[in-house]
Amino acid sequence: MIEPTLAQKLRDLAGSWGRPPDDAAKLAAALAVTALLLVLTGRGRSILGLGPTPAPRRIFLWVTAFSAALLSIVYIAHYLRGGPRIVDATTYFLQGRALSHGDFAWPAGDPSASFRGRFLLYRETAAGEGMMGGIFPPGYPLLLAFGFGMGAPMVVGPAIAAALVLATYRLTRTIAEDALANAPDQLVEAVARTGALLSVVCAALRYHTADTMSHAATALGIALALDAALRGRVVIAGLVVGAVVATRPMSAVAIAIVVAVVLLRHPTVRAAGARRILVNLAAATLPGVALLLVAQHAVTGAWLASSQRMYYASSDGPPGCWGVGTQAGCLFEHGEFVAARFANGFGIVAAAGTTLRRLRMHLLDVANLEPLALLVLVPLARARGTARRSPAALAALAVIGLHVLAYAPFYFDGNYPGGGARLFADVVPVEHALIAVAVARLVSAARFVRGSFALLATALAGFAVHASFEHLKLADRDGGRPMFEPDLLARANVTSGLVFVDTDHGFALGHDPSARIKSGVVVARLRNDDRDRLLFDRLDHPPTYLYKYETPVTAVGAPRIPGVAPPPPVPAAPVVVPWAPAALGDTLHFEAEAEWPALSQSNGYAVPVYSELCAFGSRALLLTPTPVSGRARATITVPVPQPGRYEVALRIVQGSKLPYATSRGATLPRGTVTLEKERWDWVDVEGAASADLATHEVVLTPPAAHLVLEAEGGGVAVDRISLKRLP
């Protein structure tokens, strides 16, 4: 790979700049010019509630809330190209669909590997039934469930966008009443309206209220909870903090601490006594906490288990990688990132670097232009003519600072184009409130209208010539469209039957756990082995289709050549075609990597790896011990179509490695497979090569058998398992 030059690194740091690259950016530029004209002419006072004929508050809030919702709808069409794009968002989408039917978790179906995969936790119950659920908390999926109930899940985000405008207005007004000592009510109203307008023009919020991600809902909860606490409303603050717990538990840490402190010091509440305040606050959070516990129990089978931790404990490694400390850093999900940032472990220095990268990205998210974000610090200073700092402004700044610290122990920065520093997006409305107050602090009351519209003009111009390039990157990534579009099925006249998909995103977007083959579409994963035929047979040979989504070759991941522009991305062209799996032969073949994530793993991790020269389907399941000299164990399932005696054959791939990880030690790795009472042993030699192990006869019973893979002294890989039923 060609190392980027210093100039290239500086350009990366500064971001992209240029003429407005698309219609949305051009519209922002036109609005920026309009706002600038208001600055130069001093007009627009009525919009902010000033002057002899101020625009009625209700009309202003209706118009701004509607505008935010409309812009989020436009974002769905223009940048998302019609539906969820990020894989996390598609999993939330699936969880919302399932919850609309009352299911936190649902039966996985058989073969289970036709429905399992990324960001889905699968477990076997005591009764032997396979259950599956999404790994994310239930708060935001519950909101999506209401959207599914109305037949329009994508309207949930725009509805949150409208609510965010109202919440930002209210929070800004509350802070301004405290921070702007002795200010007339008209100025306080103008500041509150500025905060609302800033929410409307914030491009990061347009993304987070368009894609089905949980950050906008969390931001709404944090803004409402802080406002309730500043107004001394204990029960409301507690209820909303509980909702944040159910939506993003880590994001609830900062707001819970600040809410408790604010209420304990509130002049109209503290007379009740600290104990009573804390008891009432804690009691009010219980509905949200209970929702989280019930959902986690349904998915994990345990009341106090974390679905995300359990998922990464069975899908990635090294053990404990989804956590803090030197072992943090999951090498399958984020291997390239871990190798580049903290190959020697995640410590204080690495945590600081990750936090700084988030903050760098977050500066752009706040108001479309990095310097504007620094205005959040202005209310920290004492107000003119007073010796006090605003307690409300200090509380808001504490929420932001503690929120940043709460995520510091998490190793992955989570940044991406359009979504920005998404882990910090939860506090953007609080920052908008502080920026609006900052304008009132920096300019006189007589010049506030000019200062407000100058702020809005700068934010709009920032999107037009700078931030919009990040959102275009989001629009063009991964083929430039959602990986499952119901409209394509409709155009192909597919109203019922079985549809195989070949992407994680497509499965999560298309799968409905409640779908039945005769009255709807059952979406399953294409495994390119006999699992596809087993599912086809089990569903009694329904009309079957293949939804093929091939991401075109782009410059993503290619070496960057200084001074040479990368080729433009080519959009994907998915197709829906009639298709049926080949009939079963005498011998059934099952790809081992289709069973990822494993049922369980210990002292190591089992993940799919590429092996283009040797493995069927170019992939195999690699088990690597941690440390590499140790002994690891993983359990997967093998489909069994009917009871009987089978001749079982194994194909292994020797010399397999996981990129960015140490897969081999000083000695040759040794592998062992156990199926029922039969055992296969081998030594993994250097060099990529496949090998067939000796066959064994095994008595198996449906629906599946447990296969135990062990590795000692390094990684070993299983390509596929073959079963031939004996007479």
Image (cartoon, rainbow, N blue to C red):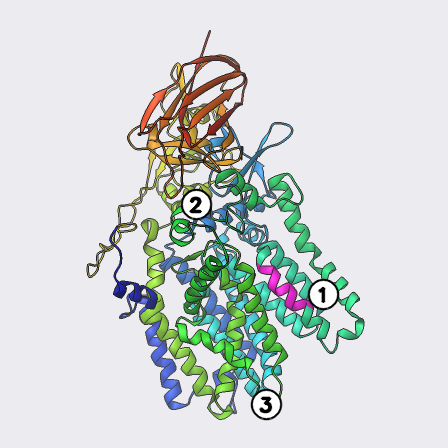
Highlighted range, magenta: 251-260
Residue 322 percent across, percent down from the top left: 52, 47
Residue in the foreground of this view, choosing between 535 and 601: 601
Report whether 181 appears left or right of 276.
left
Q: Between 713 and 323, which is closer to the camera in this rendering? A: 713
Residue with the mark numbered 2: 333
Examine the residues drawn in magenta and state their main secondary structure.
helix
Q: Which mark is residue 235?
A: 1
Say the numbered circle drawn on residue 307. none
Depicted 199 relative to depicted 45: above or below: above
Q: Which residue is mark 3?
A: 184
Question: Label 2, label 3: how many angstroms apart (C-alpha)?
Answer: 54 Å
Tag 1 or tag 2, which sits nearer the N-term?
A: 1
* Amino acid type at image mark 1: Val
Q: Tell me the element at label 1.
A: helix
Determine if the magenta segment contains residue 255: yes
In this picture, is 258 found above or below 610? below
